[in-house]
Image (cartoon, rainbow, N blue to C red):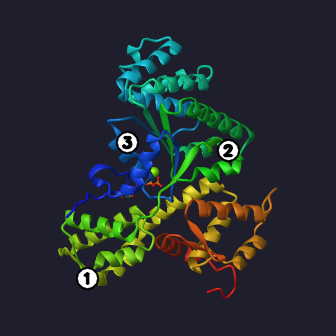
């Protein structure tokens, strides 16, 4: 029987990576066909893990370069971050060093002897002296000349784009739009020019499509094929719980693992792992590793929905605020809380929200449409008949626990 090491909260690969065999097969097939991919899924579905595991499996055939852009604010930051990543690949780094040593008028050795932070500062200075896109083009040419084809995995691209687009109040500025347009046009140009030599995968913890749609720039990534990662099915989730139990000597009684999966409904891998972690902790605390189906609900109510769940939810809310902006966020929060507390956001409730809110220079209906689109695209809510319902029962329960005390349903008597 298989064993699995717990995931914690960060990305997993190798002996911590469970299943996703079909997803990996399809993902790798597309990479082998030379496609550029936009990897999309709800939060915590395992996007980063899938990229890391694919890179691990493809190491022999591709030069896999994983770049996290979460801390970047500009195109120059992104190119500098990518450049510094090449240090791991001797043959690529040697050529990249030539570029920066020439621009900065320093020796190649002086780029060799410094630590990561200093190297980043130097390389970034090189990128920003003059035209960043020309430096970026040279970098792509270097990548295209690598011995093995390059798989460039860019994580948290939407976070970077969102930052580039928007000013302090989360509103798109003309300068931001211009900078984003230039960066994505540059990426598009290189992705087309080096197709077959360099494959690019874009991903992030917020959807790229809603962010670009707000700016009218969606067409710039239409040569990236969307690849959707779905929740685990019952068998995969039960298998994961059993493999974890096997590793940590937990014994499920009366199909407790099935009860856990049934309660989650929508098996987002991180939530399956969290659930097991709570079960394991409670078994250790009481000194009995047998866990019965009758105890599942207690662990869900007392541990999954506890303050640790609130911390997870804060993350969901922060990401939502990032996409929608400060002005629109309270309305989005209201709509989601309505869906959590009354179990459905109905057309009547949406109309009541429309009558209640006003925005400067924008029709409330347009704002509501945008919110619903983000909710659907980023996997918060789904449309069932005419109502919007939470996709994940756990996220809904978190939302309800956190906000229900301070919330009155928008329609009198709706609960
Ligand atoms: N294939 C997998 N096998 C086991 N656990 C997984 C798998 N994929 C995801 N997880 C669990 O989910 C957690 C989050 O994974 P990961 O960071 O890859 O998700 P993500 O979709 O990139 O999240 P975010 O939306 O925050 O960027 C991991 O710590 C792990 O517990
Ligand atoms: Mg991620």
Which secondary structure lies at badge 3?
A: helix
Q: Residue furthest bottom?
A: 413
Instruction: Identify the disc placed on residue 240.
Output: none
In this view of the protein, can residue 167 be seen by the observer? no
**Contact (Cβ within 8 Å) of mark 2 with mark 3:** no
Residue indicated by mark 1: 254
Q: Is residue 206 above or below residue 128?
A: below
Label 1 or label 3, whichever comes before in sequence order: 3
Quadrant, the C terminus:
bottom right
Residue 208 in percent (x, y) is at 59, 49
Residue indicated by mark 2: 219
Q: CA distance from mark 2 to mark 3?
A: 28 Å
In this view of the protein, can residue 397 be seen by the observer? yes
Residue indicated by mark 3: 55
Disc 2 within 8 angstroms of ligand 1 (CB): no
Label 2 or label 1, whichever comes before in sequence order: 2
Residue located at (60% from left, 25% from top): 132
Is 42 situated left or right of 63 in this image? right
Label 2 or label 3, whichever comes before in sequence order: 3
Residue located at (29% from left, 82% from top): 293
């Amino acid at each position: 029987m298989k064993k699995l090491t717990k995931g914690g909260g960060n990305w997993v690969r190798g002996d911590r990576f469970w299943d996703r065999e079909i997803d990996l097969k399809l993902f790798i097939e597309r990479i082998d066909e030379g496609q550029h991919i936009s990897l999309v899924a709800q939060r915590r579905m395992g996007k980063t893990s899938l990229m890391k595991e694919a890179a691990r499996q493809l190491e022999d055939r591709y030069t896999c370069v994983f770049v996290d852009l979460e801390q970047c604010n500009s195109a120059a930051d992104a190119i500098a971050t990518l450049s510094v990543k090449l240090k791991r690949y001797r043959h690529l780094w040697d050529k990249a060093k030539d570029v920066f040593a020439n621009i900065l008028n320093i020796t190649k050795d002086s780029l060799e002897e410094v630590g990561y932070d200093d190297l980043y500062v130097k390389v970034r200075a090189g990128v920003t002296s003059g035209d960043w896109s020309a430096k970026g083009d040279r970098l792509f040419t270097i990548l295209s000349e690598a011995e093995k084809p390059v798989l460039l995995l860019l994580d948290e691209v939407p976070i970077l784009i969102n930052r580039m687009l928007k000013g302090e109040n989360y509103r798109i500025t003309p300068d931001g739009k211009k900078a984003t347009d230039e960066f994505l046009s540059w990426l598009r140009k290189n992705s087309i020019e080096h197709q077959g030599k360099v494959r690019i995968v874009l991903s992030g913890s917020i959807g790229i499509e809603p962010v670009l749609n707000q700016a009218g720039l969606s067409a710039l990534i239409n040569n990236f094929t969307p690849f959707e990662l779905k929740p685990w099915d019952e068998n995969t989730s039960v298998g994961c719980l059993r493999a974890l139990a096997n590793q940590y000597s937990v014994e499920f009684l009366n199909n407790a693992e099935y009860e856990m999966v049934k309660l989650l409904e929508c098996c987002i891998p991180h939530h399956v792992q969290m659930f097991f972690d709570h079960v394991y902790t409670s078994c250790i605390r009481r000194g009995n590793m047998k866990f019965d189906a009758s105890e599942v609900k207690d662990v869900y109510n007392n541990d999954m929905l506890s303050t640790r769940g609130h911390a997870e939810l804060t993350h969901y809310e922060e990401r939502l605020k990032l996409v929608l902006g400060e002005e629109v966020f309270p309305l989005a929060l209201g709509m989601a809380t309505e869906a959590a507390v009354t179990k459905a956001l109905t057309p009547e409730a949406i109309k009541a929200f429309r009558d209640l809110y006003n925005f400067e220079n924008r029709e409330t209906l347009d704002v509501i449409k945008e919110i619903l689109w983000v909710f659907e695209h980023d996997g918060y809510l789904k449309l069932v008949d005419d109502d919007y319902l939470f996709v994940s029962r756990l996220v809904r329960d978190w939302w309800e626990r956190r906000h229900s005390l301070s919330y009155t349903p928008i329609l009198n008597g709706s609960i």
